[in-house]
């Protein structure tokens, strides 16, 4: 997500949040290590619809969420946030590029290895004869929903 879009999203989130209980509540800043604060807010919103009353500020550049610490669900929200703020899974992809000829013989023409983070993308290029190239765009995911969808498609 671009910086401008993240800033606008954070501003919109805070502008539309309900501040009916805007008394002087004690606040606590929680610094995130891995998770984008806007993404964290959106994920928390699915479990805690009243998150607008709990989160008082989102500081994108500092990866910081400021919470109303006397809200009844503050501890529960903070615990859930700690569960979500974990390093992304690191994956090793070992790729074998094989040319299959018309006579069904096979020849390994490339063997790149890639280390990437879950959710990230990586482009792998492989040169062919006559100046042609193959490009493989790889995105790693450990999402059970995505894996199940791929399994369904591969059965067809």
Image (cartoon, rainbow, N blue to C red):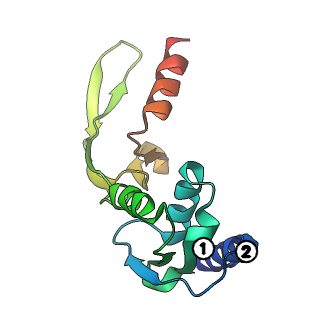
Where residue 63 is drawn, which disc sits there?
A: none
Q: Quadrant of the N terminus?
A: bottom right
Do we see residue 22 in this rendering? Answer: yes
x, y percent for residue 13:
68, 71
In which image quadrant can residue 129 be found?
top left
Query: 141 above or below 43?
Result: above
| Quarter where residue 94 is shown | top left
How many badges with numbers are in the image? 2
Q: State how far apart marks 2 and 1 are (Cα).
A: 31 Å
Query: In the rendered structure, which disc, 2 or 1, sits on the residue that comes first in sequence?
Result: 1
Foreground of the two, 4 or 62: 62
Tag 2 near tag 1, CB within 8 Å: no
Identify the mark at residue 2; answer none if there is no mark. Answer: 1
Instruction: Residue 1: tell me if it is visible.
Output: no
Which residue appears at 62% of the width and 60% of the height? 50
Within 10 angstroms of label 1, few (less than 14), some, or many (20 or more) residues?
A: few
Measuring 40% from the left and 55% from the top, which residue is drawn there?
80
Left-right relation of 11 to 54: right
Q: Quadrant of the C terminus?
A: top right
x and y percentages locating residue 22 in the rendered image: 66, 81
99 over 52 or under it: above or below: above
Q: Which residue is mark 2?
A: 20
Viewer-side label of 2, 1: 2
Question: Which residue is nearer to you in this view: 133 or 73?
Answer: 73
- Residue 154 relative to residue 5: left or right: left
| As drawn, 79 above or below 109 | below
């Amino acid at each position: 997500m671009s910086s401008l879009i993240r800033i606008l999203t954070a501003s919109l989130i805070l502008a539309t949040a309900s501040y009916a209980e805007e008394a002087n509540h004690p606040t606590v800043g929680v610094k995130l290590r891995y998770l984008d604060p806007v993404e964290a807010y959106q994920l928390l919103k699915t479990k805690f619809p009243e998150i607008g009353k709990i989160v008082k500020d989102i500081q994108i550049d500092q990866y910081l969420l400021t919470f109303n610490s006397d809200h009844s669900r503050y501890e529960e929200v903070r615990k859930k946030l700690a569960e979500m703020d974990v390093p992304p899974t690191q994956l090793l992809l070992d790729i074998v590029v094989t040319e299959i000829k018309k006579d069904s013989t096979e020849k390994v023409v490339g063997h790149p290895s890639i280390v990437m983070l879950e959710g990230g993308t990586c482009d792998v290029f492989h040169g062919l004869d006559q100046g042609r190239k193959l490009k493989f765009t790889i995105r790693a995911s450990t999402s059970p929903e995505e894996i199940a969808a791929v399994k369904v498609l591969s059965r067809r």
